[in-house]
Image (spheres, grey):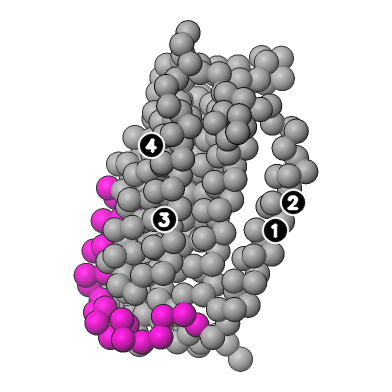
């Protein structure tokens, strides 16, 4: 089997898109711009899923995340007025502490990954030829049947909770 | 140079860690509730990328260790995480609408009724 062409290029391109999208999400003043950046990051991430030979998760990512959850976000952004928020201060008072805590977490990640890098074999991942969607379906309805039903219950609770929260008078 | 061009599992894990930290910075420093919720989505996506990358890693492992081409448990778990993200977004935005109706603002600093 021939090795995949230009894997490194696509990986770095998609990673740069994801990271730039993430930075834009947390720095933009206008919420709609943040949502657009998040949609871009999510689409690039579904490309990364395709590179990892997970086409079903990539499709679910596009349909559910970029198509469902982000539309919900944009809908709520349109419901509330954003003009006044844009004039206010965007970062809270403890932003320095927050960034310091995040940097400490980053140092922890770096330490773990430099210490444990030998756990992962270097070099190219071997491509597998399986029927991904079919295999995931039989896992979901076989081994993970109970978790699947619990997830449906969770979604029911979320629907009822959202309706109760957004209702004017209960 | 060779390790830069040969994309391994570790590359994906480092990317996911960077995305996770971006989400943590967003949650800790922003005042707008909607952007805080979007940062939580970033964190969940970082976890999903980890899960799918490690599922890919297990597919390359020998069958005796639980690997093999049918080791898709990470991808199944990623789908469950996406389900949770949908539920969380619906509930969070519902709470946000209720909060905005009461206080006419979307700043997290104003959520202080339970604070002493």
What kind of element bears circle 4? helix
Q: Which residue is mark 4?
A: A47
How many C-alpha atoms fall within 10 Å of the one at disc 4: few (<14), some, or many (≥20)? many
* Distance between the alpha carbons at the discs numbered 4 and 3: 15 Å
The secondary element bearing badge 3 is classed as helix
The C terminus of chain B - image quarter: bottom right
Query: Mark 2 sits on what residue?
Result: A111
**Tag 2 near tag 1, CB within 8 Å:** yes
Horizontally, residue A35 falls left or right of residue A23, namely left
Is residue A22 shown to the viewer in this render? yes
- A167 or B58: nearer the viewer: B58
Residue A83 painted magenta: yes
Compare marks 4 and 3 and give the one earlier in the sequence.
3
> Which chain is mark 3 on?
A
Determine which residue is flagged by label 1. A107
Residue B100: x and y, percent?
33, 80
What residue is shown at x 54% (from left), y 46% (from top)? B15
Q: Residue A156 lies in magenta, yes or no?
A: no
Mark 2 secondary-structure assignment: helix
Q: Is residue A15 above or below residue A78?
A: above
Task: Give the CA separation, mark 2 to mark 3.
Answer: 24 Å
> Measuring 61% from the left and 20% from the top, which residue is drawn there?
B60
Give the residue at mark 3. A20
Establish if B48 lies above or below A85.
above
Q: How many angstroms separate mark 3 from mark 1 (CA)?
A: 21 Å
User: Do callouts 4 and 3 point to residues on the same chain?
Assistant: yes
- Residue at image point 68% right, 52% down: A109
Decide: marks 4, 3 in contact (CB < 8 A)?
Answer: no
Chain at tag 1 = A
Q: Is disc 3 in contact with disc 1, using a CB cutoff of under 8 Å? A: no
């Amino acid at each position: 089997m021939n090795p995949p062409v230009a894997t490194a290029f696509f990986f770095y391109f998609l990673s740069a898109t994801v990271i730039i999208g993430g930075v834009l999400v947390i720095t933009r003043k206008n919420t709609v711009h943040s949502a657009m950046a998040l949609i871009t990051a999510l689409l690039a991430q579904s490309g990364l899923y395709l590179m990892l030979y997970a086409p079903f998760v990539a499709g679910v990512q596009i349909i559910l995340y970029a198509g469902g959850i982000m539309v919900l976000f944009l809908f709520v952004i349109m419901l509330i007025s954003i003009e006044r928020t844009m004039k206010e201060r965007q970062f809270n008072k403890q932003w320095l502490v927050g960034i310091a805590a995040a940097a400490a977490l980053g140092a922890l990640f770096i330490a773990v990954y430099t210490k444990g890098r030998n756990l992962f074999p270097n070099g190219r991942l071997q491509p597998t030829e399986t029927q991904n969607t079919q295999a995931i379906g039989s896992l979901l309805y076989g081994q993970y049947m109970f978790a699947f039903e619990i997830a449906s219950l969770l979604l029911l609770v979320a629907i009822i909770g959202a309706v109760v929260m957004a209702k004017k008078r209960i | 140079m060779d390790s830069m061009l040969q994309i391994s599992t570790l590359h994906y894990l480092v990317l996911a860690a960077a995305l996770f930290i971006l989400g943590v910075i967003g949650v800790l420093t922003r005042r707008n509730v909607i952007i805080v919720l979007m940062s939580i989505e970033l964190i969940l996506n970082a976890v999903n990328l980890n899960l799918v990358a490690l599922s890919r890693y297990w597919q390359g492992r020998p069958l005796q260790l639980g690997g093999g081409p049918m080791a898709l448990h990470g991808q199944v778990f990623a789908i469950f995480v996406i389900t949770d993200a949908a539920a969380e977004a619906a509930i969070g935005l519902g709470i946000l609408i209720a909060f905005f109706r009461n206080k006419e603002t979307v700043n997290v600093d104003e959520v202080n009724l339970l604070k002493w």
